[in-house]
Amino acid sequence: MDQPQSDRAAHKAALDGLRRVNRLCTSTGLLWKALHALSKNRPEPLRVLDIGSGGGDVVTRLARHARRAGVSMTFHGCDMSDSAVSIATEAAATAGADAFFFRQDVIGQGIPAGYDVVMCSLFLHHFDNDAARTLLTGMREAAGVAVFVDDLLRTKLGYALCWAGCRLLSRSPMVHYDGPQSVRAAFTLPEARNIFERAGYVGATFRKHWPERFLMQWNRT
């Protein structure tokens, strides 16, 4: 799934499998609560960018939360894969979610400006320490209000849950392989804290949540 020009049918099957896995996680609910809190008492709608948005399921669900709550927010997602952008756009339209997706290589091209919140979900573990620090620094510099990062934790329980969940919820060989490998590549919580600190995230808060993931929130003061 990391390859920008993966076969579209295989890519879609993998992203559909991840969408089912993510429905069982608490990530979107926690992100929505934090975004809703940030949106209060603001004269303009909160502008949110999800980088490495994949199939767009996180952005789509957040946009639906906002619509149900009657809260005006702008949701955009970007990914370096053309097929992922296409799949996410179709999924958002099918769900009736007001979300826009576009192609952007945030490593090679940088993170677009003009957003209040820059976030990523299940994206950080794709990078080694130095690249992760570079990415996080760019997110911090681009965000006008806050940064959110939700990702896997490298734990034995997390590996077991991922291995079982990927096989129960998806038939995609890509998901069966990539899921457990992603946990192997993820950071422990102390490692994550260290990387964020080195990237300048003073005052960041970390919350561990189901299933063996963490949510980091940093607010610009």
Image: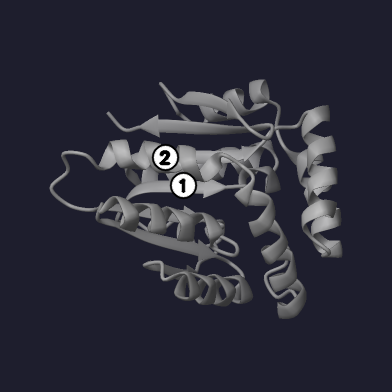
Residue 61 image offset from top left, x and y in percent = 47, 56
- Mark 1 secondary-structure assignment: strand
- Residue 37, disc: none
- Circle 2 packing at 10 Å, graded few (<14), some (14-19), many (20+), is many
Residue 124 image point, x, y percent: 62, 44
At 84% from the left and 36% from the top, the residue drawn is: 160
User: Quick check: 17 above or below 141?
Assistant: below
| Residue in the picture at 67% in, 70% down | 4
Determine whether the residue tagged by mark 2 lies in a helix, strand or loop: strand
- The amino acid on which the numbered mark 1 sits, given as a three-letter code, is Met
Give the mark count: 2
Can you say whether 196 is above or below 62 in the image?
A: above
Q: First in sequence, mark 2 or 1: give its number.
A: 1
Q: How is the image coloured?
A: one colour
Q: Nearer the viewer, residue 185 or 38?
A: 38
186 left or right, relative to 88: right
Q: Is residue 36 left or right of residue 205?
A: left
With 145 as the anchor, is 156 left or right in this view? right
Q: Position of residue 32 (x, y in %)?
A: 41, 43
- Residue 147 is labelled as 2
Look at the image and tell me whether residue 2 can be seen. no
Q: Which residue is mark 1?
A: 119
* Front position in the image: 110 or 126: 126
For the point 80% across and 29% down, the residue is: 157
Q: CA distance from mark 2 to mark 1?
A: 6 Å
User: The residue under label 2 is which amino acid type?
Assistant: Val
Q: Are marks 2 and 1 in contact (CB under 8 Å)?
A: yes
